[in-house]
Image: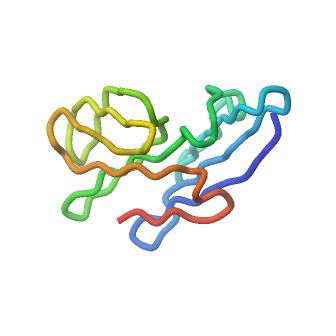
Amino acid sequence: MAYEGAINIIIKGEVDGTIDIWKCKNCGGTAADLRRIGEPKMPESVGMGTLAEIGRWGVIACNDHGETEWHLTQSASTISHNCNVFGKCELTVDEKGSIKCSNNHDHKFYFISNYINSSLVIG
């Protein structure tokens, strides 16, 4: 794996975390790891996560009434999602990044390939 780049996640004008992007030199697959401000140490599996095409990785943003959360996931998937903004629901993200929520909450999906070595401003 080789380090490909990073994305700063900006919420309310402040860096809330970073996504590190790694690329496999053999297969071309991409792994992404998130680091949040205030977490005491990096995950043990940095650079060794799930491999997928860079175009599948994205950030789900949950933003309502001034409260914001973000989560790293892949498009073309269905996940059980639980956040402090909306609570628990099932999310389906299609290959174009459109989200359907089982509880009709307003989540947004941002492809990380559009933000490598820059910042993603949420909210």
Give the side of residue 53 with respect to residue 69, left or right.
right
Q: Residue furthest bottom?
A: 13
Q: Residue at x 35, y 27 (%)?
A: 79
Image location of residue 91, percent across then percent down: 30, 33
Quadrant for the C terminus, please. Answer: bottom left
The correct choice, above or below, for 9 with respect to 85 in the image is below
| Colouring scheme applied when the structure was drawn | rainbow
Q: Residue at x 14, y 37 (%)?
A: 103
**How many labels, in total?**
0
Q: Nearer the viewer, residue 71 or 92?
A: 92
Q: Residue at x 49, y 59 (%)?
A: 16
Q: Quadrant of the N terminus?
A: top right
Query: Residue 116: percent from the left, percent from the top?
Result: 65, 57
Left or right position of 26 against 35 = right
The residue shown at (76%, 48%) is 4
Please state which of residues 71 and 44 is positioned toward the viewer in this rendering: 71
Residue 118: name its quadrant: bottom right
Q: Is residue 55 above or below residue 18?
A: above
- Determine which quarter of the picture holds residue 26: top right
The reply, left or right, for residue 106 in relation to residue 94 is left
- Closer-to-camera residue (97/15): 97
Residue placed furthest toward the left: 103
